[in-house]
């Protein structure tokens, strides 16, 4: 059962990594990142709504707090998808995917701010490690030859910040209701937000374009089945295992970019990526183990 859970989480992470490549292909065809983000979430919403209807009575929840947290999760995923594709457009898949996984650091800083987490030397060491990795990845150590534009780095970190908001929203809503209900509400709000922001004419044009297959594939692989795989998988494994396995996403995205799309990374950039991913993995596993210990007590 544990190995099945790890397999599902890994499959979800691979799907998320591939979605960055599909998004890059669509951007190279001239489609706007916000429109691409909208269809990724809109197609996924159909999957989650069908999952919700499967056991409608058991999934329904009457709680104002539940809806507030679910809506915040929706805002988080809307920002995450949008900034992720904008970062890919301004930088590369490898940079965008790696910077997005700085989310646990944002979660940690927000937890410090609200007194949810206790500040320790280990946690600040992890934050310092991630900052060092970002400096190496973006080339900020040499202002005259920065390898990643400020816009690309800012968008990648923005994706991480909104990912942290999704984590907060989903985690708090999960304590009250079912994941299929949370995802349905979150992605409905996602669709409303991005439809209002996106270019309406271009959004409508997608339906009759020759690229509709790519958009459907992006929604199915990049959010629809992948989120379902992840939610089911995380129930069947430990949070520590899930945290480590989820790092397959930036690795998959980076390989997709380098092998299929012709992206190039310097040795120093690769070192920065490794530092960020290793630090985030150690932090996530440590946090998960601490949480498990507290639950047992």
Image: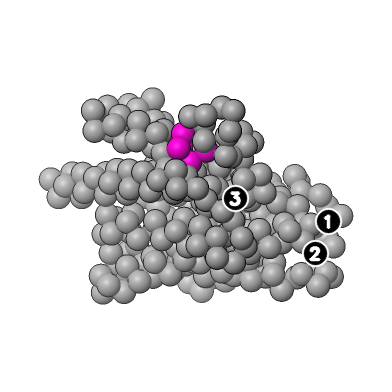
In this rendering, would 119 be left or right of 46? left
Closer to viewer: mark 1 or mark 3: 3
Q: Circle 1 sits on which residue?
A: 202
Residue at x-position 39% and y-position 66%: 10
Q: CA distance from mark 1 to mark 3?
A: 24 Å
The x and y percentages for residue 266 are 50, 48
Q: Residues within 10 Å of mark 3 (few under 14, many from 20)?
A: many
The tag earlier along the polypeptide, 3 or 2, is: 3
Q: Which residues are magenta?
A: 134-138
- Whether residue 191 is visible, yes or no, is no
The tag earlier along the polypeptide, 1 or 3, is: 3
Q: Circle 3 sits on which residue?
A: 92
Taking the magenta stretch, the answer to whether it contains residue 135 is yes
In this rendering, would 146 be left or right of 5? right
Q: Which of the pair 246/42 is nearer the observer? A: 246
Taking the magenta stretch, the answer to whether it contains residue 193 is no
Give the number of the disc on residue 206.
2
Tell me if label 2 and label 1 are in contact, CB under 8 Å.
Answer: yes
Label 2: which secondary element: helix
Q: Which of the pair 36/262 is nearer the observer? A: 262
Closer to viewer: mark 3 or mark 2: 3
């Amino acid at each position: 059962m544990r190995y099945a859970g790890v397999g599902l989480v890994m499959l979800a992470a691979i799907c998320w990594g591939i979605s960055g490549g599909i998004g890059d292909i669509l951007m190279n065809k001239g489609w706007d990142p916000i429109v691409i983000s909208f269809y990724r979430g809109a197609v996924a919403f159909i999957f989650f709504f069908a999952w919700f209807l499967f056991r409608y009575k058991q999934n329904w929840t009457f709680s104002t707090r539940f809806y507030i947290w679910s809506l915040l999760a929706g805002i988080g995923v809307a920002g995450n998808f949008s900034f992720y594709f904008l970062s890919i457009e301004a930088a590369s898949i490898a940079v965008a995917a790696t910077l997005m996984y700085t989310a646990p650091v944002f979660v940690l800083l927000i937890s410090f701010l609200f007194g949810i987490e206790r500040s320790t030397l280990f946690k600040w060491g992890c934050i310092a490690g991630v900052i060092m990795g970002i400096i190496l990845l973006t080339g900020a150590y040499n202002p005259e030859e920065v390898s990643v534009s400020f816009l690309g780095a800012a968008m990648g970190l923005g994706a991480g910040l909104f990912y942290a908001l999704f984590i907060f929203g989903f985690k708090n809503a999960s304590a009250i209701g079912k994941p299929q209900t949370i995802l349905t509400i979150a992605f409905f709000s996602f669709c409303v937000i991005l439809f209002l922001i996106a270019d309406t004419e271009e959004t409508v044009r997608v339906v009759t374009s020759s690229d509709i297959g790519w958009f459907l594939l992006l929604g199915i692989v990049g959010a629809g089945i992948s989120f379902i795989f992840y939610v089911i998988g995380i129930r069947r494994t430990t949070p520590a295992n899930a945290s480590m396995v989820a790092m397959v996403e930036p690795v998959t995205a980076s390989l997709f970019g380098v092998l299929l799309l012709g992206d190039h990374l310097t040795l120093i950039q690769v070192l920065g990526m490794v530092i960020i991913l290793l630090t985030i993995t150690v932090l996530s596993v440590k946090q998960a183990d601490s949480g498990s210990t507290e639950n047992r007590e």
